[in-house]
Amino acid sequence: MQLKDTFNTILKPSEEVLFKDKNSKFFGYAFPVKNEDAVKFHLNTLKKQHHAARHWCYAYQIGTETIKFRANDDGEPSNSAGQPIYGQIQSFKLTNILIVVVRYFGGVKLGVGGLINAYKTTAQLALEASKIIKKTIYTEFLITFDYKNMNKVMRIIKEKQIKIINQKLELSCELQISVRKNDAQLIFELFNQLFEIKIKNLND
């Protein structure tokens, strides 16, 4: 059975988008992120940029195997902002992404239904303004062996067109390789059955 070894994310931060409803302005932004530090950085930047705004609502999803996500209403009625934004991340099937919607209150209350629609639409506009790309998930291995076994190792690397990331070729050699997640088990077994050659999964 083939494992899923690709995921969709966005190439770079989106253009700023604007949605208006009853004098309230909603500015939308999408960012590619790999960790929560990046989430904090983008939120802080937007809070400085839009210091006069009322709400900075957001949702993010990070990870491919272990998923981390969060939806934040930032003072709006419960589930009227963060959840509709997160719904768009799911609907576009994206990960490693943060969407922030900044609201300037226009003096007229929109009601929960109006808010859900505004946050959902702004998130959707931000994603439509982004370039969505497909990325492959790779597994990295460390192979250790004595110099005399170099040919055995290199034969497999050449045959299977394996990408070498790092190498230390001395009396005792180390190769760091990267293979598609789908091929990882097969490659591991090929090296693991070789005499005097050790292979270790660096993703574990």
Image (cartoon, rainbow, N blue to C red):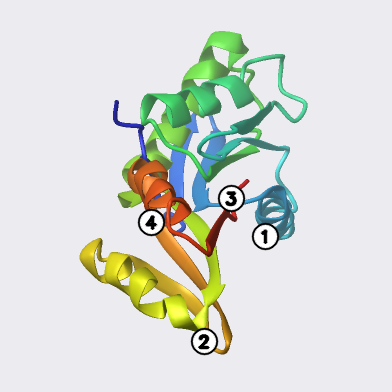
Can residue 13 be seen here? The reply is yes
Residue at (53% x, 72% y) in the render: 145
Q: Is residue 93 above or below residue 190?
A: above
- How many discs mark residues in the rendered view? 4
The answer to which of 190 and 177 lies nearer the viewer is 190
Which residue, given by chain and number where applicable, does mark 1 sit on? 49
Residue at (38% x, 30% y) in the render: 93
Label 1 residue SS: helix
> Distance between the Cα atoms at labels 1 and 3?
38 Å
The answer to which of 57 and 91 lies nearer the viewer is 91
Which residue, given by chain and number where applicable, does mark 4 sit on? 179
Left or right of 200, for residue 127:
left
> Distance between the Cα atoms at labels 1 and 2?
50 Å
> Distance between the Cα atoms at labels 4 and 3?
11 Å
x, y percent for residue 147: 49, 83
| Mark 2 residue type | Leu
Which of the two marks, 1 or 2, is nearer to us in this view? 2
> Distance between the Cα atoms at labels 4 and 2?
20 Å
> Distance between the Cα atoms at labels 4 and 1?
41 Å
Q: Is residue 148 above or below residue 157?
A: below
- Quarter of the image where the N terminus is located: top left
Q: Name which of mark 2 and mark 3 comes first in the sequence.
A: 2
x, y percent for residue 178: 43, 61
Which residue, given by chain and number where applicable, does mark 2 sit on? 169
Which of the two marks, 4 or 2, is nearer to us in this view? 2
Q: Which mark is residue 203?
A: 3
Q: Is residue 94 above or below residue 161?
A: above
